[in-house]
Image (cartoon, grey):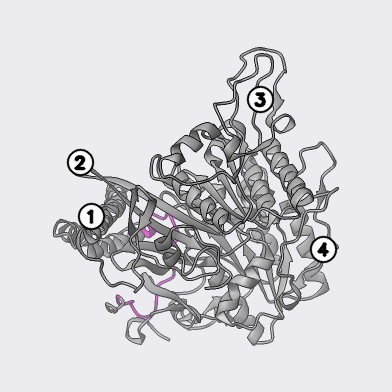
């Protein structure tokens, strides 16, 4: 498809129905060690091969380590521009001798990267959103002046680090919003590496990003399994399956299935199944826990809930027989009924005709 | 059954679930996790209004309008006459300059006239959107012309970026009150976290349409439910829906609905 930017991973491009929509910021999420940085590097490498100017802003690892780590795959990243935004060793002194990174560091070619930058003995560099933004902006305009070209791809690795280092307190949402606006206005395709720290909290970058590629990692017996899924992709259809993924000698490989829900064979399919099962079991037990809590509460308040108890035991039976879909449906129905009984949401006026359950579809 | 004046949502199955549509002139919440289809649902609601010759307004707080324009293109809906108000804050300045708030002179732009490239923050001043300034702006817009349908996308962005944290609930409540007094039928989209509790905004609206996103062996499965609907009966079950090239379609079998 035209007008798409490749992620550098063939199978993932297929999942995205051709690739990313250009000039927008996206999030790559996943637990530590799931391959986020590797995926981001694939993306940059693909740009470099096409002769596009690419920029890596690193906050997690010093450039020297990034270089060494990616060397394992034998990739040539020499023409990659790298902006070192790792904070120095903190000078634990009381003077306000802290200076922002932006005022003193510059951007280097990957090939010039050598050892880790040593913290200055006198002044420690610290990183703030402001300084990172300023650095990127400077680099952009310099590039435009020098070579009359714009950066096409940017990777921010990682926003989690930036948030932890320099966005404490209540302004952090606004700072992230402003930073994402800044990235959007640069009109480069951006991958932002970020970790979901807490699933019950809505973090700004996840709902502001135009898409999310999520990497999964879990233990199956004593083997680590990996998978990738698209959680959100604005303005495009996408493959909504969780696809198995491997990290091998050549980097990330996603087992692409070009046709819709046709099952992958062999071990790949088993990976997918075992993972899905874990996910749905979690989901069902969560809902069931809620329902049980609700039932306790109802007993306390002496609200009659015989029918819900019957329904929930049915859900339990489904659960034990591993009919997770049925169990989930039943449990969800119990949950919403209980909530109404408990007055957590006001009860609706009675329907004229008692509603019947929807027939099973498909 | 339809005592109060109800208007269509633009999605036939959803209208059935709502026993005819939404009671006009009230604010409603459309909630769901990121990527569940809230913006698409809201656009379909506006498209329905436009087709009936109504005046409709989309307030963009989350995404730049140029991207929304491009994103909606595959659906081939005629949204040319939709008024789009860009309420995205500019890049913040870190200097202690006086803050420029979005002014009451800001005008919505017709969808057909929207540029396809992002609006750039000017070099010397950046505008910020606070709930206060946005409300003023909307007020003067509503005085100038009568809007029938309004979408706020999203109330989460409004809360995160345009309010002070300690007064969130109160301010949201007052904002919804403002929409009610203006007499517009409004949809406010609300982001839900993947786990955990529903934000308090849900309790303030007259109704809540919730989108659910579940994964199973056939990929992402989507469901919609009416969590609450004041002043009307509604379907109480969770119904499956799909997003296709013609937008959101809710699969409600005639046999399973009550009276419609």
Give the residue number, with chain letter if any, for mark 4: B106
Foreground tag (4 vs 2): 2
Image quadrant for the C terminus of chain B?
bottom left
Chain that bears disc 1: A
Q: Which residues are drawn in magenta?
A: A339-357
Give the residue number, with chain letter if any, for mark 3: A125
User: Mark 3 and mark 4 in contact (Cβ < 8 Å)?
Assistant: no
Q: Disc 3 and disc 1: Cα gap in Å?
A: 46 Å
State whether discs 2 and 3 lie on one chain.
yes
Give the residue number, with chain letter if any, for mark 2: A222
Residue B86, horizontal then vertical, whole percent: 73, 63
Foreground tag (4 vs 1): 1
Say few, some or many: other residues with alpha carbon within 10 Å of mark 1 (under 14 / 14 to 19 / 20 or more): few
Q: Disc 4 and disc 3: Cα gap in Å?
A: 41 Å
Say few, some or many: other residues with alpha carbon within 10 Å of mark 3 (under 14 / 14 to 19 / 20 or more): many
Residue B147, horizontal then vertical, whole percent: 72, 75
State whether discs 2 and 1 lie on one chain.
yes
State whether discs 4 and 3 lie on one chain.
no
Please, is residue B168 above or below residue A340 in the view?
above
Residue A249, horizontal then vertical, whole percent: 35, 47
Say few, some or many: other residues with alpha carbon within 10 Å of mark 2 (under 14 / 14 to 19 / 20 or more): few
Residue A110 located left or right of residue A216 = right
Chain that bears disc 3: A
Inspect the magenta stretch and tell me whether residue A348 lies in it. Answer: yes
Please, is residue B219 above or below residue A293 in the view?
below
Q: Quadrant of residue A270?
A: bottom left
Which residue does the image show at 35% across and 84% down from the upper left? Answer: B253
């Amino acid at each position: 498809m035209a007008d798409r930017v490749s992620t550098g991973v063939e199978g993932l491009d297929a999942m995205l129905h051709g690739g990313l929509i250009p000039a927008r910021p996206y999030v790559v999420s996943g637990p530590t060690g799931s391959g986020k940085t590797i995926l981001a590097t694939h993306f940059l490498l693909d740009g470099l091969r096409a002769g596009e100017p690419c920029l890596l802003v690193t906050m997690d690892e010093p450039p020297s380590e990034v270089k060494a780590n990616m060397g394992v795959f034998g990739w040539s990243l020499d023409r990659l521009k790298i902006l070192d935004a790792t904070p120095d060793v903190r000078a634990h002194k009381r003077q306000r001798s802290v200076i922002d990174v932006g005022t003193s560091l510059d951007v280097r070619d990957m090939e010039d990267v050598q050892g880790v930058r040593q913290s200055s003995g006198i002044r420690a560099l610290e990183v703030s959103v402001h300084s990172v933004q300023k650095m990127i902006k400077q680099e952009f305009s310099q590039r435009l002046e020098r070579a009359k070209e714009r950066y096409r791809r940017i990777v921010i690795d990682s926003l989690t680090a930036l948030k932890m280092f320099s966005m404490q307190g209540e302004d952090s949402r606004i700072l992230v919003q402003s930073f994402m606006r800044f990235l959007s206005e640069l009109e480069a395709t951006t991958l932002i590496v970020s970790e979901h720290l807490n699933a019950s909290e809505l973090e700004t970058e996840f709902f502001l990003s135009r898409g999310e590629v999520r990497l999964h990692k879990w233990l199956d017996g004593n083997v680590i399994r990996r998978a990738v899924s698209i959680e959100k992709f604005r303005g495009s259809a996408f493959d909504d399956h969780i696809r198995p993924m491997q990290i091998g000698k050549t980097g990330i490989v996603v087992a692409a299935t070009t046709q819709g829900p046709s099952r992958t064979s062999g071990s790949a399919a088993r990976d997918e199944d075992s993972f899905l099962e874990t996910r749905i079991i979690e989901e069902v037990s969560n809902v069931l826990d809620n329902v049980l809590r609700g039932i306790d509460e109802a007993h306390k308040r002496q609200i009659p809930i015989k029918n819900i108890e019957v329904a929930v035991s049915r859900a339990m039976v489904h659960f034990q027989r591993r009919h997770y879909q049925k169990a989930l449906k039943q449990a969800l129905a119990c949950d919403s009924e209980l909530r109404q009984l408990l007055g957590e949401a006001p009860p609706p006026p009675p329907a004229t005709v008692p509603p019947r359950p929807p027939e099973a579809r498909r | 059954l339809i005592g109060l004046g109800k208007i269509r949502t633009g999605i036939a199955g959803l209208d059935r679930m709502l026993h005819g549509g939404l009671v006009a002139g009230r604010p409603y919440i459309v909630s769901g996790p990121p990527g569940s289809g809230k913006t698409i649902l809201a656009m379909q609601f506006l498209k329905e209004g436009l087709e009936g010759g109504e005046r409709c307004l989309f307030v963009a707080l989350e995404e730049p309008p140029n991207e929304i324009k491009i994103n909606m293109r595959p659906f081939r809906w005629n949204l040319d006459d939709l008024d789009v108000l860009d309420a995205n804050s500019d890049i913040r300045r870190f200097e202690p300059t006086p803050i420029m708030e979005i002014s009451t002179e800001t005008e919505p732009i017709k969808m057909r006239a929207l540029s396809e490239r992002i609006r750039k923050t000017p070099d010397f001043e950046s505008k910020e959107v606070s709930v206060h300034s946005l409300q003023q702006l909307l007020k003067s817009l509503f005085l100038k012309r009568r809007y029938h349908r309004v979408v706020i996308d999203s109330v989460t962005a409004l809360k995160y970026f345009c309010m002070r944290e300690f007064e969130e609930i109160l301010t949201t409540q007052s904002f919804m009150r403002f929409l009610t007094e203006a007499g517009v039928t409004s949809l406010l989209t609300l982001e839900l976290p993947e786990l955990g509790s529903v934000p308090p905004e849900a309790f303030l609206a007259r109704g809540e349409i919730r989108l659910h996103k579940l994964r199973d062996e056939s990929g992402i499965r989507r469901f919609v439910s009416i969590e609450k609907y004041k002043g009307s009966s509604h379907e109480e079950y969770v119904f499956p829906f799909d997003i296709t090239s013609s937008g959101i379609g809710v699969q409600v079998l005639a046999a399973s609905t009550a009276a419609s």
